Amino acid sequence: MTAALRLTDLRLAYDTPRGPHTVVQGLNLELAAGRIACLLGPSGCGKTTVLRAVAGFEPVRAGEIRLGDQLLSSPRAHLPPEQRRVGMMFQEYALFPHLTAAQNVAFGLRRLPRAAQQARVAELLTLVGLADAGGRYPHELSGGQQQRIALARALAPAPALLLLDEPFSNLDSGTRARLTAEVREILQRAGQTALLVTHDEAEARHMADHVGVMHSGRLASWTPRETLNTF
């Protein structure tokens, strides 16, 4: 399979009064197109910093980030977030309360003709199992339904890569387990390449084709789904 995302010798650091503080060091991974990967680890291990760097929100101190054949980040190059063809779904969902579910999904499609917008919104609402909920507002939806609308909105512009930042952390355990399976199925049906970060081992096992365990800013292992039972 062609590598959709490639991180090579990646180093990420924050500036402090005492100089740069390294958060991620020497990270290498490849994610094939259409596959789902998860970075797993406790708070402070660097997984969210990696996600932010891929999105374009953090600079790269060494190494590079590529999406397909395109260089996104290196110490000498930085493509702005809006030009990266990367979508992001946050744990807060951040749905606009004054917009309906359909209007939330359509938010990233404003440059399309109206008919094309409507067709894409209808397609995505059907994909996430909420074809009849387009006219409802976020406060009229359950937490799980809001999560699926947020996913539909992130998928709407057809990003080359979707990033998910602890997307199930605000849900109760029963809903989280159910939606993990549902979201994996939705992403697979869409053929979407995705990178998830979480601290939940069960979530990583059920969601991902590859699980990368992070420890102290380094990738300790990169395990394919087929061998996750030994992980």
Image (tube, rainbow, N blue to C red):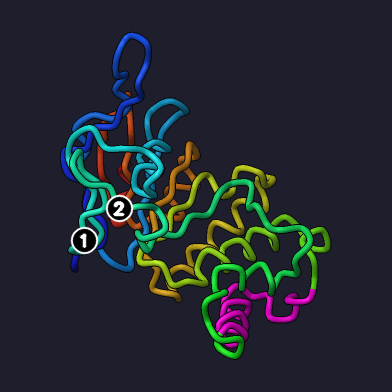
- Image: 158 above or below 196: below
Looking at the image, which residue is at 52% across and 81% down?
112
Q: Which residues are magenta?
A: 117-135
From this viewpoint, which residue is outermost toward the bottom? 115
Magenta span has 80? no
Residue at 64%, 65% (x, y): give it: 149
**Residue of label 2:** 79
Quick one: quadrant of the C terminus? Answer: top left
> Residue 201: image x %, image y %?
46, 40
- Mark whose residue sits in front, 1 or 2: 2
Mark 1 highlights which residue? 70
Q: Give the amino acid type for the residue marked by disc 2 in the picture.
A: Leu
Q: Give the SS element for disc 2.
A: loop
Amino acid type assigned to the residue bearing label 1 in the image: Gln
Q: Nearer the viewer, residue 202 or 47?
A: 47
Q: Quadrant of residue 147?
A: bottom right
Mark 1 in CB contact with mark 2 (< 8 angstroms): yes
- Residue at coordinates 20% horizontally, 43% vertically from top-left? 74
Give whichever of 39, 209 is nearer the camera.
39
Residue 186 location (% of width, % of height)? 51, 70
In which quadrant of the rendered view does residue 50 lie? top left
Residue 158 location (% of width, % of height) = 44, 72
Of the 4 image quadrants, the one containing the N terminus is bottom left
Which badge, 1 or 2, is on the more N-terminal residue?
Answer: 1
Q: Quick one: label 2, few (<14), some, or many (20+) residues within 10 Å?
A: some
Where is residue 63? Give x, y as percent: 17, 39
